[in-house]
Amino acid sequence: MAFHPIAADDDDGAVGVARKYAWIVFALTFGLLISDYMSRQVLNAVFPLLKSEWSLSDGQLGLLSGIVALMVGLLTIPLSLMADRFGRVKSLAFMALLWSLATLGCSLAQDYPQMFIARFMVGVGEAAYGSVGIAVVISVFPKHMRATLASAFMAGGMFGSVLGMALGGAIAAKLGWRWSFAGMALFGLLLAVLYPIIVKEARIAPKRVAGKTAAAVKHPLRTLFSSRSVIATYIGSGLQLFVGGTVIVWMPSYLNRYYDMGTDKAGGMAAIIVLCSGAGMILCGMLSDRLCRPSPERKVALAIAYCLGSCVLLSLAFALPAGPAQLALICLGMLVAAGTTGPAGAMVANLTHYSVHGTAFATLTLANNMLGLAPGPFITGRVSDLIGLHGAFQLVPLVSVAAAGVFFYAMCHYHKDIARLNGEPVNDTPDLTPCEVKS
């Protein structure tokens, strides 16, 4: 049987994990991420039915969706910190059980207040799953696969969103909206029960021995913000997702206004673009690991290339008139736009102590939301009110240039920050070529 040598970030020790078992852990954790987003996004598919049955306003419907995102934003870091402290496997199983039961509660809700409470609990359950889940996944695979794993795992959110809306709508059309929620809940409950039975903390936690890094890192929590590289990575990742998140949110409206597509066709085309973005996450992450295995520091340079590549492709796309050529370039641009997800995840894992990886990814998630996914659609909407959506879309790709600049700053300090984390002597004297990427 093949084994992955799982080394600590600091190479203090290693544990042998069977390759088959590692992929089972990934599949179950990925499956729960799919369930997470299916439970979150199924609501969007049944908006019209809820609005009609309970005579709800658009504001009330929006609040049902927004309360989940609010809870995720508020609770991601504290719950991730608790999971790092008390055990990631049992924490993930509890999270999944909570959001699945809450989703089942949505199917039983008799009025708006009950639905609001159920959605509130969905948000509490899902708050830290993404950050803790990826920390579990990277713990059972070699370091050189981190970009691939981070990108593939985070792409699960996009695939789960598409599945949740598509399956939710199909189930609602045949059985009613309550069964849409019930179906998502049953899927999550099944995985929540299986997860702690199959995934064991003792089998995935590396057995580390005392070493130079153990002595060097006396306060692991401080590594979340102790280096210029990791702070720049948080910021660069968030800025780049400003672009991808904005295009995804506003693309149905763009297709409706400039292509005269109905909501069904616009939604279908937008879904294809979302899938391109998800596929790009995985492909770009795999490319990063393959090209950068001899020198992991090169992932920073590749992240810069993804930023600039998406800027060029999307700028060209929105310089063209509506038509097949524009749509093709948008798909290509979105294929590259989310490519920084894998390298950024790998960089955060390499620059922080293994014992706080759940909290580190929670911090990255917070930056992605606060700098990119949250302000992007809002700012673009305000700009659209002034110059039109097409004009706003012509400006959005320029944010990728700022993201590339921040990643370049990270590259200037990455090698020394890694050495400092590993307890190696570091020459802080400025180099003549400070941004040279060393192998």
Image: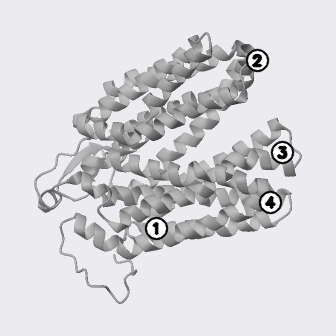
Label 3 vs 4, first from the N-terminus = 3
Point 23% across, 68% down: residue? 420
Residue placed under numbered mark 1 in the picture: 291
Label 2 vs 4, first from the N-terminus = 2
Is label 3 or label 4 in front?
A: 4
Is label 2 or label 4 in front?
A: 4
Q: State which quarter of the image contains the N terminus.
A: top left
Q: Where is residue 245 shown, x and y percent of the image?
A: 62, 51
Label 4 vs 1, first from the N-terminus = 1
Q: Are marks 2 and 4 in contact (CB under 8 Å)?
A: no
Query: Residue 256, labelled with which disc?
Result: 3
**Which one is in front, 270 or 72?**
72
Q: Mark 2 to mark 1: distance in Å? A: 53 Å
Is label 3 or label 1 in front?
A: 3
Dot 2, crowdedness within 10 Å: few (<14), some or many (≥20)?
few
Dot 4, crowdedness within 10 Å: few (<14), some or many (≥20)?
few
Among the 4 quarters of the image, the one containing residue 178: top right
Query: Residue 52, labelled with which disc?
Result: 2
Q: Mark 2 to mark 4: distance in Å? A: 35 Å
Name the kind of residue labelled 2 in the image: Ser
Label 3 secondary element: helix
Q: Where is residue 374 shown, x and y percent of the image?
A: 57, 48
Residue placed under numbered mark 4 in the picture: 387
Name the kind of residue labelled 3 in the image: Asn
Q: State which quarter of the image contains the C terminus.
A: bottom left
